[in-house]
Image (cartoon, grey):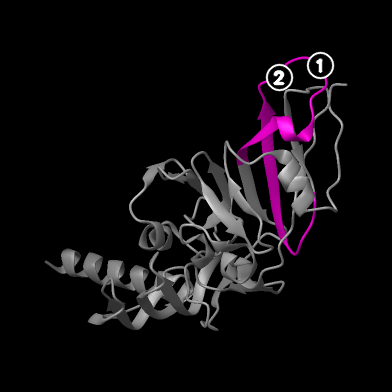
Amino acid sequence: MLFKYILIFHLLIYHYSFSQNCFQDAWGLEKLKFGYSTTYDAEQVLGKGFLTFNTLRYDNGISLIFNENQILESLILTKPFKGSFRNGFHIILDSSNIEEVAQSFPDHVADLTHNAQHCSLKTSLDSFNIEFQASSIKISGIIEYKDYSLQKINISPKVHYFLEKKEREDSYCEAPLYAPENETHLNCWVFEYSGGLMGHLEPVEQGIHKYYRLNHKLESEGNFNRGERTGIWKYYDDNGKLINTKEHFNFPANSLFFSLFLISLFLIFYISLKKS
């Protein structure tokens, strides 16, 4: 019979951290968190990797997948990866077989497909999605679970991570990108009409904003008035140490007052030219 099984198990983690549930000992992966850890965090834990597009690869079989903001989104494990899961199941890719997975996760669900040479199994445990993929060198006859050696593991959070966000009809606020986990501040935007014949509403920064680096250290903070920096802004180095302050003066360029001010300057200039 031709078949393929897909196994996914879900690991409930708080803040999508490997540290609480997934691995007992696996190259430091237990220190990383979905939806929070960045490429900087990964290289601090695992060392310098090979970054291509959105994937950070390591010789030990670990590949970390990041979103467009360089935040950890999913994980792929391939040969020669080896490690122990929270339930005590020890896995060595290209050596462990799918029968061992099925025995360690008895609540797996089989998914019948048309390809007998490749298979995977599904199960659930907490809130990680994990897919064990395996293949067999046998191409004919009865192929059993023990004939399939594990080749690849895909891991992703069951619930996708989103920045905290509060929305109103005329504005919205959300947590700063790369902010540390204990940060409670929200950056806010208001909707303003852009003007012109093809004008439309677009969000502009309003109020206190904080910006963080990939290492979760504060980069800058200050106040916005209708999309323009105003007042005292503070700037920090890579370690979050204050290195500079700068005062910004904001003229409301989109206001009637500013338009009248420019017209007045033009009239004064024009009259002075006439007199000369």
Magenta stretch: includes residue 42 = no
Residue toward you, 204 or 95: 95
Residue 62 visible in the snapshot = yes
Residue drawn where x is 51% and y is 60% of the image: 29
Q: Residue furthest left?
A: 276
The residue identified by callout 1 is: 141
Residue toward you, 138 or 28: 138
Residue bounds of the magenta highlight = 123-152
Q: CA distance from mark 1 to mark 2?
A: 8 Å
Residue 194 spot, x, y in % from top left: 54, 59
- Asked if labels 2 and 1 touch by Cβ distance under 8 angstroms, the answer is yes
Residue 6 spot, x, y in % from top left: 77, 39
Residue drawn where x is 43% and y is 58% of the image: 42
Residue 49 spot, x, y in % from top left: 36, 48
Say what amino acid the circle numbered 1 marks.
Answer: Gly
Magenta stretch: includes residue 144 = yes
Classify 231 as above or below 137.
Answer: below
Say what amino acid the circle numbered 2 marks.
Answer: Lys
Callout 1: few (<14), some (14-19), or many (20+) C-alpha neighbours within 10 Å? few
| Mark sitting on residue 138 | 2
